[in-house]
Image (cartoon, rainbow, N blue to C red):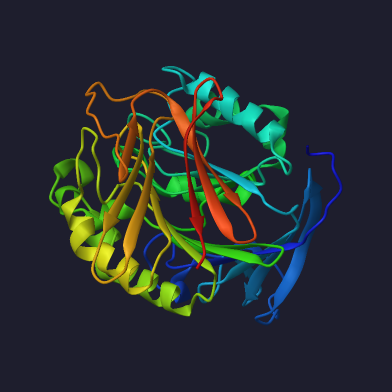
């Protein structure tokens, strides 16, 4: 439970791949003006206790101003108990309707039973229906987020979020980045970024992507006009290739909104098979986690050489698919009702569990490090 004493220390490192406005970092806007003569230094600006976590934040100064990030690095230290549980939820923001509150309650109860609570929760996109949010003051921040995930256990939870296609529609996707600046519960420092979570002697490097910019359908759609200039595809692929190359973690997990393979209504994302999958193979990524299809899926696909892609889809955070396709065999599992995915970090393995809206475990998979 959350009241148990701290047992292990974990280090969490954030690496931001791009300015949130797509601009070079030298053009990054300044916030919180300080002394004009301040040099480029990293300083500790906050230390606070949240449940089981103690967070120390480092911000960067240049020309008398605090910068959101510098040279792709924002660093934070977090103390957590061993074997943290991390829920993954997608396609959820519906002002509490269409089973959203029920799934939120199931996650809260699941976290309450976990030894450490849930220090982190990952949102795999489509955070606000139907058209994203227009500002940090948009009513949906309250009706779809703060007022829905308001159980006490969530006070100790840090959300790590990526953008879905609905977040890019008529809303302002930058508002979800800006919300991070004033709300510590929500963390989206850029459209794509990475974090390293270390518990005991176990390290998992997470790489969070904006897969919308990798799907040509959106590039050509009037609904998503502006992707050509605002969301450059090569830079993101170059960033994730470099970040994966530099990772020394035992486990590498990539998170994006769109699945590479899917047995749901939307089907496979061929652009990701062409552009992203080769990088997962190249760097021996342990798992790819997505949403987009409004269901729960596990798909195992043999690739070139000895590499096997383990993909988990957790897009059943509220409304679910009408199409009831089947996929129950050794390499594929699918569930069409609301629920979520939970991952537990352990000494020699990652344990994934799919959980329904009533909190019942449906299906599990263990990945053991060889």
Q: Nearer the viewer, residue 369 or 19?
A: 369
> Does 177 appear above or below 202?
above
Please give the count of numbered marks on the rendered protein.
0
Residue at coordinates 78% horizontally, 47% vertically from top-left?
Answer: 52
Residue 276 visible in the snapshot: no
Q: Nearer the viewer, residue 98 or 205?
A: 205
Q: Position of residue 37 (x, y in %)?
A: 70, 81
* Occupied quadrant, residue 41: bottom right
Q: Is residue 301 left or right of residue 36?
A: left
Q: Position of residue 291 (x, y in %)?
A: 36, 41
> Does 160 appear above or below 91?
below
> Does 235 appear above or below 104?
below
* Occupied quadrant, residue 320: top left
Q: Position of residue 117 (x, y in %)?
A: 70, 40
Q: Residue furthest front?
A: 330
Residue 318 visible in the snapshot: yes
Q: Nearer the viewer, residue 131 or 344?
A: 344
Residue at coordinates 50% horizontally, 45% vertically from top-left?
Answer: 352
Q: Residue furthest right?
A: 5
């Amino acid at each position: 439970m959350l009241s148990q004493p701290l047992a292990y220390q974990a280090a969490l490192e954030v690496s931001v791949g791009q300015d949130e406005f797509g601009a070079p970092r030298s053009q990054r806007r300044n916030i919180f003006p300080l002394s004009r003569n301040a040099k480029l230094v990293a300083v500790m600006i906050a230390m606070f206790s949240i449940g089981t976590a103690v967070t120390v934040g480092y911000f960067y100064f240049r020309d008398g101003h605090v910068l959101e990030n510098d040279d792709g690095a924002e660093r934070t230290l977090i103390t957590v108990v061993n074997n943290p549980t991390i829920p993954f939820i997608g396609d959820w923001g519906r002002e509490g309707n269409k089973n959203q509150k029920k799934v939120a309650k199931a996650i809260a109860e699941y976290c309450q039973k976990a030894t450490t609570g849930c220090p982190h929760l990952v949102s795999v996109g489509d955070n606000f229906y139907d058209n994203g949010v227009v500002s940090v003051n948009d009513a949906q921040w309250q009706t779809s987020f703060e007022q829905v995930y308001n159980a006490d256990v969530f006070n100790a939870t840090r959300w790590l979020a990526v953008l879905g296609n609905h977040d890019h529609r008529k809303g302002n996707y930058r508002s979800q980045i800006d919300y991070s600046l004033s709300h510590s519960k929500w963390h989206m420092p850029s459209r794509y970024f990475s974090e390293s979570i270390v518990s005991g002697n176990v390290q998992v490097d997470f790489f969070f992507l904006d897969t919308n910019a990798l799907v040509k359908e959106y590039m050509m759609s009037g609904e998503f006009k502006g992707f050509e200039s605002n969301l450059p595809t090569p830079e993101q692929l170059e960033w994730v290739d470099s970040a994966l190359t530099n990772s020394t973690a035992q486990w590498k997990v990539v998170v994006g909104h769109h699945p590479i393979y899917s047995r749901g209504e939307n089907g496979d994302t061929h652009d990701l098979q062409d552009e992203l999958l080769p990088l997962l193979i190249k760097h021996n990524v342990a798992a790819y986690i997505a949403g987009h299809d409004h269901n729960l899926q596990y798909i195992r696909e043999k690739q070139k050489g000895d590499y096997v892609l383990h993909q988990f889809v957790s897009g059943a955070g509220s409304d679910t698919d009408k199409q009831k396709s089947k996929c129950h065999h050794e390499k594929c599992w699918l569930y069409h009702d609301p629920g979520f995915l939970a991952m537990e970090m352990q000494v020699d393995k990652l344990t994934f569990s799919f959980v329904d809206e009533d909190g019942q475990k449906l299906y599990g998979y263990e990945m053991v490090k060889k």
